[in-house]
Image: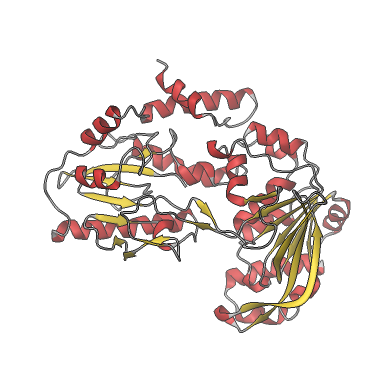
Amino acid sequence: MCRDLIYQRVAKQDQKFALLEVDQLGSILHSRFLRLPLPYGLVRFGVAPDHPEVKNVINTFAATAENERCSFVGNVSVGKDVSIHELQQAYNVVVLSYGAEADRELGIPGEGLVGVESARSFVGWYNGLPEHRHLQPNLNTEVAVVIGQGNVALDIARILLTPIRLLQETDITEYALEALTRSKIRRVHVVGRRGPLQAAFTIKELREMVTMPDCRTVFTAEDFSGVEEALAGIPRPRKRLTELMLKSVTGRGQTEQEVQRLADASREFYVKFLRSPIQVLPSADGKRLRALELAVNVLEGSGKSVRARSTDDREVIDCGLILRSVGYRSVAIEKSIPFDHSHGTIAHENGKVNGKQGLYCSGWVKRGPTGVILDTMSDGFQTGKLILRDIESGVVSAETRPGSEAILRHLSNKGVQTVSFDDWKRIDAVEIERGRERGKPREKLTDLKEMLRICTER
């Protein structure tokens, strides 16, 4: 989601490299030039605030950035402040790994109405991504719909339904916390076009929903026709997830305390399978949404080839907020880079960019927006191993190149205020102090001008 420039020196061969947001590159150490004056990208802006344990990977990144052979430079936009060609002139290798920063759209009537937002924008809003800090999601409604059933969709539902007292203990932005405190949302529908056996969310995220205080998880029993009979033939992780859903559907094994808790709950989380959005219905003035129309689906095929087919049956959910969570797309940051627009990825062969010597790619911009942080790290290792093999075989040029000195001089001449890791530590200290004042781990800064001002204070 952030465009990062990383450069690195390999001690054994004394070669310098420019890289774009790579989490791990085999034995290669790294540091970054970032579009924002902040490190950690997806970990900071994508991981839900109530999942602090996932953010522990930051400790590894910080240790790397502190290495004497690394440096960190923020507030640099690749493609604007510095071009790929200029990077390749300065470094032996450039790796593009800048993620997916555009949304996939539904392509249905009414999608542009006020009240329809993207999941990426909403997550950026509560996680403090500067470009989304002014988002004003409509929380003055009782019903919200999330279209999509991945873990991000469940993250959003959880944030909307979690008791405020629990969110107050996280690093969620203060403005989002204030808005959620005033929120009237009491029901969230998470809608997916296929069935329970194809659900994209994982058991951890679902378990958090079914055990949430003051919230009742609701499934439609008809959506589970034939599902229990299919349990014996599915892999164990999918089986455990499905069993958890069946337990909620049937009430089987629930204690008296659980039954009473669900009966007393004031909020509801609906998981609606076999539904596809057809159109967003407008309000009387034609400007805002008032409801979402869904087609009821049936499944055809089996196994990995199963497909959802729409029937003539329709359902309508009255709502005031729709959050689109159907995936992301990478974008081409320069015309010089071969790009597969149909898939939203860089054209490459095993991570080596087509027709570009010394240019590689990694992560979502390489394989598409799938997987979790561990998958992206593994992909970074694979690209790193490819680079090392190309170094050893002589595919990568061994000529001496100016490296960071040339790029930093270029940025200085253009008047770009760069941010070092020590500068980031000043921002970090301010965030932690402001968080301490509010009883939170940190209060994220979202104003870029304020961040840059803090960086210049001594």
Residue 330, image x and y in percent? 45, 55
Furthest residue toward bottom: 301
Furthest residue toward top: 458
Residue 284, image x and y in percent? 83, 51
From this view, report whether residue 450 is shown above or below residue 308: above
Camera-side residue of 339 and 455 = 339
Residue drawn where x is 62% and y is 40% of the image? 126
From this view, report whether residue 369 is shown above or below residue 61: below
Side (left or right) of 39 relative to 251: left
Q: In which quadrant is the C terminus drawn?
A: top left
Side (left or right) of 142 relative to 399: right
Residue 138, image x and y in percent? 73, 43
Is residue 253 shown to the viewer in this render?
no
Is residue 181 shown to the viewer in this render?
yes
Camera-side residue of 368 and 231 = 368
Residue drawn where x is 62% and y is 51% of the image? 118
Residue 336, image x and y in percent? 30, 54
Q: How many marks?
A: 0
Residue drawn where x is 44% and y is 54% of the image? 331
Furthest residue toward front: 285
Question: What sort of colour scheme is used for the picture?
Answer: secondary structure
From this view, report whether residue 208 is shown above or below residue 426: below
Side (left or right) of 65 relative to 105: left
Residue drawn where x is 32% and y is 43% of the image? 6
> Which corner quadrant of the image does residue 310 belong to?
bottom right
Side (left or right) of 357 relative to 56: left
